[in-house]
Image: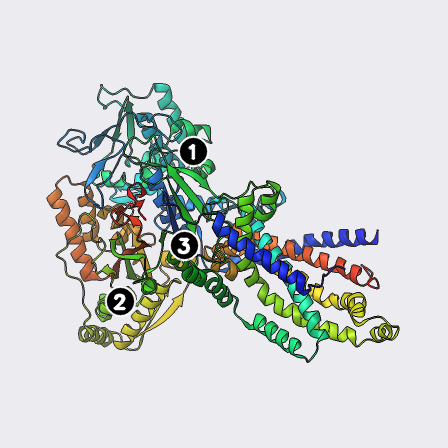
Amino acid sequence: MMFALMNRKSAAILILIVLLIAGLNYQLIPYNKDEVLVIETPAEPRGLDPATNYETAGGNIIHNIYETLISYNGSSTTDLKPVLCTIIPTPENGLISPDGINYTFIIRQDVKFHNGDTLTAEDVRYSFERVVRMRQSPSWMIMDRYNPERKKWEWTYWHNHSYDDLDDNFTVMTDSEVDDYNERVDAHNSRPEVINNTMRKWTYAVKDWTVRFKLDAPYSPFLFVLTHTVGSIVNKRTVEAHGGIKEGQKNDWMNEHTVGTGPWKLKKWEPDRTKLTIERFDDYWGENAKLKEVIFLTVHQQTTRIIDLQMGFTDVAYVPTPSLDEVRGKEGIIVDEGAMRLAGYFIAFNCEDSIFSDVRLRQACTLAFDYDVMLNVIYNGLGQRYVGPWVHGMYGYNESIEVWEQDIAAAKDLVQDYKSDNPGSIEVALMYTSSEISSLLAQLFRSNCDEIGIDVTLQLLSWPTLLELTDKGDFDCTLLGWLADFPHPDGNAPTVMSEQKGHSNNAWYENQKVDAWLLEAVQTNNETRRLELYHLVQNQVKRDCPYLWTLQPNVPAVYRDWVKNYVEANNPFLGRYYADVYKEK
Amino acid sequence: MKLFEFIVRRLLLLIPVLIGLSLVTFAISHLIPANPGKAWAGEKATPEVIEQVEDEYHLNDPLHMQYFYYMSDLLQGDLGDSPTTNRPVREDIESYFPATFELTLVAMTIVVLVGIPLGIFSAVKRNKLPDHLIRLFSLMGSSMPIFWLGLLLQMAFSFYPGIVFGIPLFPPKGRIGAFVDAPDRITGLYIVDSVLTLNGEALLSSLAHIILPAVTLSFAILGIIMRITRSSMLDVMNKEYIKTARAKGLSYNEVIQKHAVKNAMIPTVTILGMSFGGLLGGAVLTETIFAWPGMGTYSLQAIQHLDFPAIMGFTLLIGFVYVIANLVVDIMYAYLDPRIRLGG
């Protein structure tokens, strides 16, 4: 008979088998190991190629597998240390030329890649060449630079022009190699105006254990840019053996495999992307990692992550700020609330083509917002107020600048003043995407604006739709966030630059003084003047209110008490460095 | 031969179905007012990089040309690349679909082994206590939100045993233990591959991990199947031929097993087939709660990111699965009731 009738005996046998499976599973298979750290996160990495990756989950893993020329000391975001070079270039030690154009890096010797190859200066040069020629999402950090003649952000394509003015002591590429590069550029380039413009170009001279970068014009954030994972050094031989560099295209092999020099190497990444394992690299040039492996598990459901943490199935779990009360005080669980992140959240007002083109309304909304409720209720006190476009911990942030405070009376006065010139009701729409915090912030904004006579409609949109409308300028105001790609103001500057309207300048803000200050700051070698300029920008932007700066949130760390050094191993910009983490039960 | 012709005819019908499905899905997904190029490239990507992404995915081409490019690639077996996973959609489906298939298979096995017998039993014991209890149970299954049930099972069989006894009964999530390597891939079904590769550890771990999500997933369909089976059985048991069989001296159990059940199965088989096809499209809630890496998870992610190639890929897959499921159901009709001739 096709459908068997289950009698009581069959049912009992089946139940026994199920219980046996359950029982044996935990008796025979471990669910926690001392030398292995298990971390549960809600998002899986999208790829592991440093030249392509531009998201947090993958970036954190790349940071542990690959290494850059320079990085930050411990939890500092301003104090640099050499990693794959031996000394930080400075004007004082002569490795930055007095005109701020030549940066020379002396490459560390006896560094092994994970496949046993030795790091060479050519690997360094090649790593940057592939970023430029592949032209993927994070490449803008390497190539998107000012054109001093045109005073605009321009796309710059790496072009090997000439080495005539390079130091004779440097051995450069042969003429045929130079011709080859030029041919490739000319064959691919569909924008002849790019070649003809005098935009910034880099040229590389490679000699033994030295790599020199020659910029077209001084660029003060250059060293900070190199700390991002986009500046990771890859093994040229391995990459060339697996697809090499294709103009404007990704490398599929590099997206799923790694070839770094860091204390960890990739052990396995499951095809379904739920589990990624890195293992200790025992031939690491520096101090070996304390743990044997780190396993990253993708678990979208927050409740499941919390259950796993409480039962010890995972050592670390991501718990968003509004849900921290579910784990606070639980036995064996530590909730660290203090890790600052170089990110800022804000509401962007459309300063060009909406009712918010009038600064009075922008200031009114900024004064009406209840910052105390935002900080203490929505964010559970985990974060700090800030005045953009820079954030705390970033070079150039003026710590003495005062934040806006709620002042309903002043806000109402501004609205009345506006209405005296523009009678009628004030109705605006706030765009936001779905997340618990975004929803709460949107509702708070609506409530506060209602109090001063501004009627706010909330629009919940998908991320691509929100981006599209923001770029087109087809909105009133929108809730957004910004994560620093490198801890220098120049990374955040596009948010307030006129030429970035419809792109990174989400508020369509325009102020020529601000543009001029930013241009001067990036080119000057005078550090005092540079800081002064960044402070001027901050003050001006605060007055103009193109953005309502909400919060620079902390990133809580939630982990089992047997995990040691977890908080200390964090850098607010780079993320967690797992080599320093260990377990002690 | 008639069966063979029937199958061939139905398979040929698959082509216009899939074309229609692709057309409708393509149109609807592109009606959303958004150009996902910037979202895929990264918010801070330069205009040139965004343009590069748009060129790669033909986002700025006229809609009909975009559809043409897509169908041209599809005819060569290329479902495109997902900008979200940075992999070919075909590879993504090869990764995620076996997980859903395996979970669905186990869930449906539970439904068949538990739901049908209980439905039959309920009909046989009509208006007695077992009938009332079973009907109550089926009502619970149909009305209980699946995400709530999943969390409940996690708490009851994983969390609380872990707190009380120091060890859970069943794992709360995942397809396999964190410290167990997935078995070497042959079919993509962990349980099957574990057996084929004689990997005892992977077999034990994957069996333990599938129980809670499969029970969760089976619950909603369980209720429906029990009620359909009961209703169908009651209808059959009132037929004249049943009374005749009893009058001829056959025992009650023989009458039920040999005559009533088979005839009562047609509606049940229909629901089973449709449910199987539906579940293969991915059970988002169950997969999310139990961190099961299946098509539900994949499709949700694709929709959230407006990942057109992935959306098209899984929609076509679902369409294909539904047609095949319907075909299997129709073939089973002929087995259950010889009076039904395939194709008329």
A384, A483: nearer the viewer: A384
Three-letter amino acid code at the position of disc 2? Met
Q: From the viewer's perspective, is the residue at label 1 or at label 3 nearer?
A: 3
Q: Where is residue A193 in the image (x, y as percent from the top left)?
A: 35, 37
Q: Which mark is residue A374?
A: 2
Marks 2/3 in contact by CB < 8 Å: the verdict is no
* Residue A364 quadrant: bottom left
Q: Residue furthest bottom?
A: B127
Q: Mark 1 lies on which chain?
A: A
Q: Residues within 10 Å of mark 2 (few under 14, many from 20)?
A: many
Q: In this view, does A146 lie to the left or right of B93?
A: left
Residue A330's place in the image compared with A247, above or below, is: below
Mark 3, other Cα within 10 Å: few <14 / some 14–19 / many ≥20: some
* Chain hosting mark 3: A
The kind of residue on which mark 3 rests is: Pro
Residue A273: image location, x then y, percent? 47, 47
The alpha-carbon separation of the residues under discs 1 and 3 comes to: 40 Å
Which residue is situated farthest in the left direction here? A528
Report the disc number at residue A188.
1
Tag in front: 2 or 3: 3
Q: Quadrant for residue A267, please give it.
A: top left
**Horizontally, is B104 left or right of A113 in the view?**
right
Q: Which residue matches tag 3?
A: A42
Where residue B241 appears, as percent x and y from the top left, is 85, 73
Going from N to C along the chain, the mark reached first, 1 or 2, is 1
Q: Is mark 3 on a helix, strand or loop?
A: loop
> Which is more N-terminal, label 3 or label 2?
3
Q: Is residue B144 left or right of residue A262?
A: right
Quarter of the image with the C terminus of chain B in it: bottom right
Q: Does residue B147 sit above or below A420 in this rendering?
A: above
